Image (tube, helix red, strand yellow):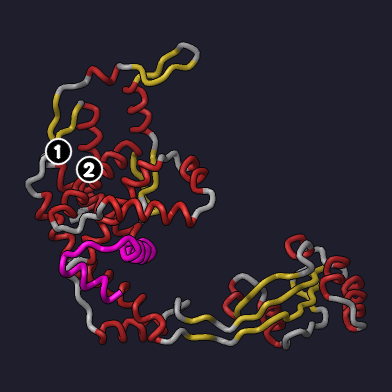
């Protein structure tokens, strides 16, 4: 990862594998929320310089026909103005679909132009390599594209944009070894740390509302009957009955979802041992501990490169460098919107952003 950072600082082109690594980190860490911010910023920045030219005649052109009855492009756009979508990274906020898509298209064009200026634009070879990697990783690649109503060309454009954006964010950002060490210490202390695997137990269960049935099941287990066979015979829990009682792994934090007595019983057992029947709610339960793992902490050296990338991305976002670079680049930009309807859509985007005081 250190070599990747050095190449970005020097303005060198990344290899496909290096870009894939940076892209995956960015997407997982902060992509949705930050992308939403960039979209909003872009829409406001261009609202001032947007222009309109008179090309309204195409709105009356037919878009499709159903049994001879036509639907015009204008009708389609009107419906888009009514249809709302959730803004990525802001699940509690919706926007009109037409407004959102218009802003996204403008945003993508600006990011690509800025990447060209900063000499971090991904090459055709890098985009193709990324596309090939996605094909290999998804055995149902063609179906995935169809489900998303996309072509390979659409996906290639999307990949190029994401790569360009990622490269812009991490360019010229530096971190020290001390920064990384502090990030590790903080990560270890956080709740549900990604670097800590909690103590956990793998269990199988038999669940039945009839106490007498459970007493019979318990007797059979004590006499040496296989737990899976007894579970198939007596358990009324449809989720585990088909798997011979196997319920998978649980940890102590699962008391948020499971009764405390259930979790405590599972961890009181030793591997291969089963509990006596106990009642929770209106059901009787027998648990067997199939396996057990102690808490594991990933050592610093094994996550150092991963943390370096997280720290440099976080630092890049917090520094405001990209935001300033973006603002300077779009200050004098010109966007021409063809058609009165498009101008109306765009102005509504800008007005909404001004009300939110994004800047």
**SS label for mark 1:** strand
Task: Please tell me whether residue 347 is drawn above or below residue 117 in the rendered image.
Answer: above
> Residue sitting at 18 percent across and 54 percent down?
115
Q: Residues within 10 Å of mark 1 (few under 14, many from 20)?
A: some
> Residue sitting at 73 percent across and 70 percent down?
246
The answer to whether residue 12 is seen in the rendering is: yes
- Image x and y of residue 6, in percent: 21, 73
- Image x and y of residue 275, in percent: 79, 83
- For the N terminus, the image quarter is bottom left
Task: Please tell me whether residue 187 is drawn above or below residue 163 in the rendered image.
Answer: below
| Furthest-front residue in this view | 125
Q: Which residue is mark 1?
A: 335
Q: Quadrant of residue 325?
A: bottom left
- Image x and y of residue 353, in percent: 23, 48
Q: Residues within 10 Å of mark 2 (few under 14, many from 20)?
A: some
Q: Which residues are magenta?
A: 1-28
Would you say 335 lies left or right of 89 here? left
Q: Quadrant of residue 72?
A: top left
Q: Which residue is mark 2?
A: 106
132 in the magenta segment: no
């Amino acid at each position: 990862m250190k070599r990747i950072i050095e190449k970005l600082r020097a303005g060198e082109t990344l290899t496909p594998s290096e870009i894939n690594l940076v892209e995956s980190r960015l997407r997982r860490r902060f992509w949705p929320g930050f992308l939403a911010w960039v979209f909003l910023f872009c829409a406001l920045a261009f609202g001032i310089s947007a222009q309109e030219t008179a090309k309204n005649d195409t709105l009356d052109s037919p878009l499709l026909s159903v049994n001879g009855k036509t639907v015009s492009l204008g009708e389609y756009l009107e419906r888009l103005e009514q249809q709302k979508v959730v803004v990525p990274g802001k699940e509690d906020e919706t926007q009109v679909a037409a407004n959102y898509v218009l802003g996204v298209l403008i945003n993508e064009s600006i990011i690509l132009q800025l990447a060209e200026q900063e000499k971090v634009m991904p090459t055709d070879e890098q985009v193709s390599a990324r596309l090939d990697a996605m094909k290999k990783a998804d055995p149902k690649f063609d179906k995935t594209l169809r489900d998303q109503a996309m072509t390979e060309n659409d996906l290639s454009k999307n990949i190029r944009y994401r790569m360009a954006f990622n490269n812009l964010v991490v360019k010229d950002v530096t971190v020290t070894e001390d920064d990384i060490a502090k990030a590790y210490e903080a990560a270890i202390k956080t709740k549900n740390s990604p670097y800590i695997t909690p103590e956990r137990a793998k269990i199988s269960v038999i669940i039945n509302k009839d106490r007498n049935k459970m007493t019979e099941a318990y007797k059979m287990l004590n006499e040496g009957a296989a737990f899976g066979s007894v579970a198939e015979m007596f358990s009324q829990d449809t989720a585990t009955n088909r798997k011979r009682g196997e319920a998978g792994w649980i940890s102590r934090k699962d008391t948020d979802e499971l009764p405390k007595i259930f979790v405590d019983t599972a961890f009181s057992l030793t591997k291969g041992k089963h509990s006596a029947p106990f009642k929770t709610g209106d059901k009787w339960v027998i648990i067997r501990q199939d396996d057990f793992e102690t808490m594991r902490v990933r050592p610093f050296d094994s996550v150092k490169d991963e943390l370096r990338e997280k720290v440099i991305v976080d630092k890049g976002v917090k520094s405001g460098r990209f935001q300033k670079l973006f603002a300077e680049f779009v200050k004098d930009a010109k966007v021409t919107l063809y058609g009165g309807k498009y101008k109306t859509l765009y102005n509504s985007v800008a007005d909404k952003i001004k009300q939110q005081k994004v800047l």
